[in-house]
Amino acid sequence: MDITSRGAFYRNGEFDGSSSSRGSGYAIRVVNDSIAIAYSNSDDWERVKKRIDEALDRSRKIGKSKIFTGRDVRSSWTKLGNKKVLDTDFNEIVDILKEADTAASNVAQLRINSISDKIVKEYYMNTEGSEVHGEYSRIYFQYLIGVVESGNYEQSSEEYGYTGGYETFDLGRIAEEEREDAVKLREIALAPSVEPGKFDVIIGPEISGIVAHESAGHPTEYDRIAGREAVLAGESFLSGKKFPYKIGSELVNVVDDPTVENSFGYYLYDDEGVPARKRYLYKDGMTSEFLLNRESAAWAGTESNGAGRSSSWDMEPLARMSTTYIEPGDYSFEELFEGVRRGVYIKSFTEWNIDDLRFNEKYVGKEAYYIENGDIKGRVRRPVLETNTVNFYSSVDAVGKDLHFNAGICGKGDPEQGVEVWMGGPHLRLRGMIVK
Amino acid sequence: MDGRTAPEIERNDRKVIEMADVEHLIRKLSDNFEEYVVKQEYASDTQVRFSNSKLDLTNIWDEYGIDIFVSSGRKTASIAVHSPDEGISKIDYLQKVLSNSPENSIYEGINDKKQIYRAVDYKDDEKDVQDMAVAAISSAEDEGARRVSGLIYKRSSEESIFTRYNTYSAHKYGIEAAVRSFIGESSGQYTAHYGPSSKADTEEVGKRSVRSILKVDSVKGNEGKYRVIFSPMAFGNIISYGSYLFSAYSIISGMSYLEGRIGKEVANESFSLVDDPTDTKGIGFEYFDDEATATKRNTIIERGILKTYLHSYSTAKKMHTETTGNAGIISPEAWQLEVDGGDSSLDEMIADTKEGVVIMNSWYLRFQDYRNGVFSTVPRDGIYHIVKGEIKESWSGIRISDSYSNVLSNISLISKEAEYVKWWNEISASKMPYIAIDKVTLTRSF
């Protein structure tokens, strides 16, 4: 794998510098009585060979040694787009940051805008005869803005990411969203808190997306279910369950699909040379497929479904998400609100977290409103949904027909590997939720 | 180079890099840029991961890399490459980036004072990393664990830094261990890190992971304000995520409520916090920062009073003070945070608590408000409810939802014992005691 990347930062109207890097090397996995991987970026074959020999020695220590091999695959794929990352000048990067910063500068006292891009070339081969070559580029933009209004502080952080060239990157739209976000923060800072109680809740796609990622994607990573990540990101509430296991309303379908065009986590072959495909994680409210890399597929007694990802040449492949989303239903935005007598509409989120079984979770609303008799009323500040996965999905009684994605960097493994993902979904209606 | 040279880097009887090549790169940078920093690192690390009491994977790294920083006036650029030749080939690119960059308003140059670096004499622990993993599993099982997961990470590197004013090379070494044990549905976790002055004891890590699992009834936790006794890991999690609040970069950016609070009370008077990269018992020790300033022990909070922010040369100049040796050239960061000086013990803290909770570990801390440090984090690996000075039951489903100013102000007891904790990206290398904090807000899921 060979990765060339660059990034730049703009803070409160000032340029904070730029960075770039190029890293490449070999990762050689050997399987005997256990598994070992040697990573080397030396150009000296004797050095590389020495590390492979060490990996061979260490793989003779008794441990787990199952791995899905499968048939040989010979293929190549590219996703570099039209306006190629390599052809995009550093000047253009700086201009993007300036424009984004300017968009919110009249309102937000705190503004941190950053952009990065990278080009990855990857070559995979194994003893079964597979040879897969991939080449792709990714672009990532993030902002954090903070507004102080009458002594109250409110913040917002949003991420945008794409696979392909700069034609995927709509600066005008992003800058406008940042500007609008800052204006809304000023109003949110002055909004009242929710009087805690039971409400019908309508959530926006940004929250559907984080919910899909945290409480459908992570718990269906089979390495977690099998206990492999217990000391780090934890296990899964699905460990030890009989499958299919009921998650919630039959209206809920959650998908992970690496092949969504231009998505941030797009790939056609994973980092273990396995073809990518769409996977239903939850189908009709029940568990369906799990996210499998070669190692966890062997434990599950099945084939890898192409979820093996490494963030870099010197990182082990783990079972990872790509684009995870709740499938749209057939309700229009207006229809979702009909019949909601007393509710809260939480369009986007600020703070969130979830326990290591991916069950007990919290989402704090950013843009949020009261709903009275089907109508959106005044803003509310930082409403909190603190619930669990089964309760959340069981409370869904209507699924919107819209679909929107947000980008993110998902962490897992040690050393921590951040891999690019999209998260998305439609508006959803949930009945009888405790809102604090 | 002014005639200075750095030691050759050799491993496995083979030279990793020709120093003449590095010196050539430095001459080129010196000729072409006003300031430069070159950091080279050769890392030879090994890590073993295990779960369900069996080895999963042994990772073996053999990596060489060079980080280059250059500046012209207030314009800055940096690049990471994997050979001196590649660095030389990027000089034109760096010049182009500099010419197209806006000025970096924080940047004030590279520390030009001659530095004196500490010498630390030690040998790497020769214990085999796979054997250490097996020992951790066995000791945890002997202690009663039904299944054990964890990792042992042995780091060994040669690091050098070159600026116009200072040059230093050093061998660095350390071990991290994390073990999580399970008995039925209950888990316990223990982590440790060992610098060159410590002897790694992974058997002890295995045992301690099990000892924190108490055989008490498990019930759902209740919301409210409680005295919470934080274990070294749980408090380490909070301090690690909140360390940005002490960085001068956060102050300059408007991201910390500690702006303008130097010399003022920011914590209970029993609480002192230091950043100590000179403590070689921990893996967070460092010889130099990113601009070759020799690192030093800095007292951030002394008996409740904020004494300093963490500075690079540039942020210090901006704020009319001296660098604390914490560069990041633009954004300074803590190396190894330590809390010492309590006079209590965990048992005394529990006995002193009418009603409260002991939290053994916590993770996934996120902020709804960076500026005021409003956060929540999710406890795990042991949440024990205390009633009338005794642990009554184990709680589940709760969350700590509070702010840094409340947490620091309401510290009531600190233990004498302190532990070197580090865990993944959740807890930076630190040395933390048990800390009892009053009126901590706990929330739960519904």
Image (cartoon, grey):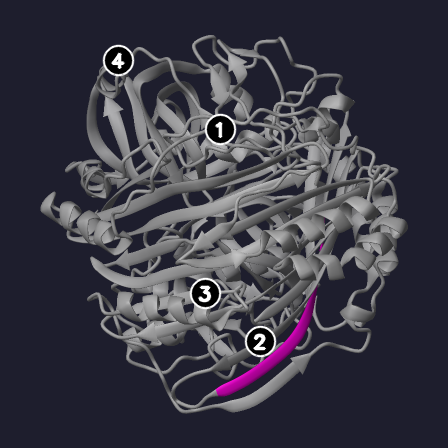
Q: Is residue B74 left or right of residue A62?
A: right
Front position in the image: A329 or B298: B298
Marks 2/3 in contact by CB < 8 Å: the verdict is no
> Mark 4 sits on what residue?
B352
> Mark 3 sits on what residue?
A39
The disc at residue B277 is 1
Mark 2 neighbour density, 10 Å: few (under 14) some (14–19) many (20 or more): many
Of labels 1 and 4, the one closer to you: 1
* Image quarter of residue B330: top right
Disc 4 marks a residue whose amino acid type is: Asp
Q: Respond whether the residues carrying marks 4 and 2 are from the same subunit.
A: no
| Magenta stretch holds residue B127 | no
Q: Respond whether the residues carrying marks 4 and 3 are from the same subunit.
A: no
The disc numbered 1 marks a residue on which chain?
Answer: B
Say what secondary structure mark 2 lies in: strand
Residue under the point 47% across and 15% down: B272
**Quadrant assignment for the N terminus of chain B:** top right
Q: Taking A139 as reference, is B270 above or below it?
A: above
Disc 2 marks a residue whose amino acid type is: Glu
Q: Is residue A347 left or right of residue B300?
A: right
> Which numbered disc flags the more N-terminal residue, 2 or 3?
3
The disc numbered 3 marks a residue on which chain?
Answer: A
Q: Taking B217 as reference, is A175 above or below it?
A: below
CA separation, marks 3 and 1? 29 Å
